[in-house]
Amino acid sequence: MNIYRRKITFEVIIDKFHELLGEIMNNWNQEKLEHTGYKIENAKITFVDLSMADYGCLTLRLCLESERWGCIYGGYSLGSGYVGADGFEGSAAGMESIMRIMDTVGCDTFNEMKGKYVRAAVKGWGDRVQIIGHITKDKWFDQESFFKEKKCQE
């Protein structure tokens, strides 16, 4: 009697995990977000900032304001360094996240994002905004799952 078994290796498990994370990050649409319990609200980007002033970490911040709330979107460490430092480090994931955010907002330049409108996926008072979308297209960026996926790939 021949019994065929698929050899499950650590690499197979990791590949499947990356595939699932990729599906989470890349496949959001408004219907799925609402089905998952998110409410979609319009927000204006009132401030954009790329700074290394916070403890030598390069961070991106977008100030989002809706009719009912305001928040800072971003805050992930994209690199390290400070004015006068001997060395600087940056991450490819950090650069990619900036470009994905600009693409989601629909801007060719970083500073052009100020004054633009986006849609924010929110669950309720006190929850962090992790997912933003283009104002008219069903195009979304989930920064939390993006960085989790990139961290798993390291």
Image: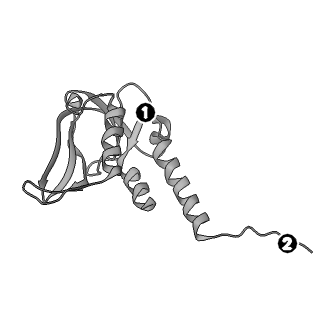
Residue at 36% x, 33% y is 103
Residue 29: % across, % down: 47, 36
**Element at label 1:** loop
Residue on which the image places disc 2:
3
Nearest the eye: 3 or 69: 3
Q: As rendered, which of 77 and 136 lies closer to the eye?
A: 77
- Numbered label attached to residue 79: none
Name the spot of residue 82 as percent of width and height, x first. Answer: 11, 56
Q: Which badge, 1 or 2, comes first in the chain's sequence?
A: 2
User: The residue under label 2 is which amino acid type?
Assistant: Ile
Give the spatial CA distance, label 1 vs label 2. 46 Å
C-beta proximity under 8 Å, tags 1 and 2: no
Q: Which-is-in-front pick, marks 1 and 2?
A: 2
Image side of residue 33 versus residue 133, left or right: right
Q: Is 1 placed above or below 144 here?
A: below
In which quadrant is the N terminus drawn?
bottom right
3 left or right of 117 in image = right
Specify few, some or many for label 2: CA neighbours under 10 Å numbering under 14, 14-19, or 20 or more. Answer: few
Question: Residue 139 got which mark?
Answer: 1
Residue found at x 35% / y 44%: 96
Q: Position of residue 67 (x, y in %)?
A: 22, 32
Which quarter of the picture shows residue 45?
A: top left
Determine the image quadrant of residue 70.
top left
> In the displayed image of the protein, which residue is found farthest to the top?
136
Secondary structure beneath dot 2 equals: loop
Q: Which residue corresponds to the image point at 45% horizontal and 40% vertical from the top-left?
A: 34
Residue 82 in the image: above or below residue 46: below
Labels in figure, total: 2
Residue sitting at the far left: 84
Query: What residue is at 57 percent from the left and 59 percent from the top?
Result: 15
Query: Mark 1 belongs to which amino acid?
Result: Lys
Q: Is residue 137 above or below residue 125?
A: above
